[in-house]
């Protein structure tokens, strides 16, 4: 559904892909996700619109049309209902017009880099980012039992949502370890491949709680100055050290934002 936001699947198509009747699929989907198919699709479109408002100078009407609304007025009503502010006010309050404090910036080493393909084993966390540690606490023992920690085992997160945009209980983050080649997984553990692509990269130094400041600087200032646009794909984080043996102010995280070709 995320990959086809601009040409969404019908309920019948989704049900067929899942192997259920449309009637049962809709109930299963709503029970697992907490939203109907239409509500989920609408939320993802509006969240994508909010990200565009935060990180680009595109006209509000253009963003509205991309979100599937035929008029500025209809988009404004739907956006305000979800974010408690009309699009123009939202952009002024948290968009590109708000410049990060350069003296207290956590971001450095900006660059564009090609990445992938990468194989990884993952465990998905759904909920506030502050609680993501529980997924890592499950992933590492499992990886140890599979003898995966002797290889590259580079810790990586695939971040599907912006915690400043998506409701906290619906934020999705895949906690991952990079591996050399595909392996067998079971239960909640799964593997995925990050395809080759071009990314804007920044080095974040400091507390994880301030990662959004570095994202804002990379997305709202550096990428536009480079004349590029962010692709509608998840961001990636690589953790260069860990809180277990590193003071909070010395934690280092490389953040990768995917770029349009």
Image: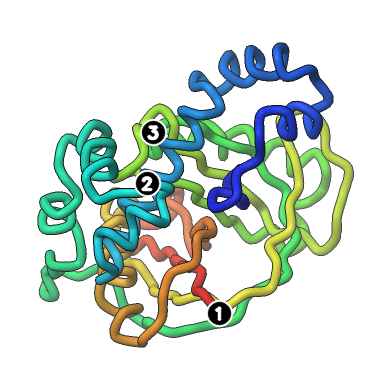
Answer few, some or many: residues within 10 Å of disc 2's Cα (few below 14, many 20 plus, some between 14 and 19). Answer: some
Q: Tell me the residue at 55%/48% (across/down).
A: 5
Q: Earlier in the sequence, mark 3 or mark 2?
A: 2
Task: Look at the image and tell me in which quarter the N terminus lies.
Answer: top right
Label 3 vs label 1: CA separation?
A: 31 Å
User: Residue 188, can we see it?
Assistant: yes
What sort of colour scheme is used for the picture? rainbow
**Residue 43 percent across, percent down from the top left:** 41, 36
Label 3 vs label 2: CA separation?
A: 30 Å
Residue designated by label 1: 261
- Please identify, in this view, whether the residue under mark 3 or under mark 1 is nearer the observer: 1
User: Residue 249, can we see it?
Assistant: no
Tell me the SS state at disc 2: loop
Task: Look at the image and tell me in which quarter the C terminus lies.
Answer: bottom right
Q: Quadrant of residue 253?
A: bottom left
**Disc sitting over residue 69 in the figure:** 2
Answer few, some or many: residues within 10 Å of disc 1's Cα (few below 14, many 20 plus, some between 14 and 19). Answer: few
Q: Tell me the residue at 67%/53% (across/down).
A: 177
**Disc sitting over residue 112 in the figure:** none
Seen in the picture, residue 235 relative to 86 is either above or below; the reply is: below
Question: In the displayed image of the protein, which residue is found farthest to the front?
Answer: 70
**Residue 17 percent across, percent down from the top left:** 79, 34
Tell me the SS state at disc 1: loop
Q: Tell me the residue at 49%/22% (across/down).
A: 35
Q: Earlier in the sequence, mark 1 or mark 2?
A: 2
């Amino acid at each position: 559904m995320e990959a086809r936001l601009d040409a969404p699947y019908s309920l019948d198509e989704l049900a067929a892909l899942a192997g259920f009747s449309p009637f049962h699929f809709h109930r299963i989907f709503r029970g697992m996700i907490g939203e109907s198919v239409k509500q989920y699709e609408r939320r993802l479109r509006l969240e994508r619109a909010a990200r565009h408002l935060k990180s680009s100078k595109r006209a509000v009407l253009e963003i509205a049309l991309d979100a599937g609304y035929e008029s500025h007025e209809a988009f404004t009503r739907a956006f305000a209902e979800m974010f408690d502010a009309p699009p123009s006010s939202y952009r002024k309050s948290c968009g590109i017009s708000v410049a990060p404090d350069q003296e207290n910036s956590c971001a450095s080493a900006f660059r564009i880099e090609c990445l992938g393909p990468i194989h990884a084993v993952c465990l998905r966390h759904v909920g506030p980012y502050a609680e993501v540690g529980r997924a890592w606490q499950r992933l590492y023992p499992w990886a140890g039992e599979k003898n995966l920690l002797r290889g590259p085992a580079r810790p990586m997160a695939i971040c599907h949502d912006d915690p400043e945009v998506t409701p906290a209980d619906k934020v999705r983050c895949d906690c991952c370890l990079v591996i050399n080649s595909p392996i067998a997984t079971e239960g909640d553990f799964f593997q995925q491949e990050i395809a080759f692509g071009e990314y804007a990269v920044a080095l974040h130094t400091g507390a994880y709680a301030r990662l959004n400041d570095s994202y804002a600087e990379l997305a709202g200032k550096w990428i536009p100055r480079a004349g590029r646009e962010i692709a509608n794909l998840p961001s990636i984080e690589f953790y260069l050290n860990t809180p277990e043996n590193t003071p909070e102010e010395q934690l280092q995280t490389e953040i990768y934002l995917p770029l349009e070709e």
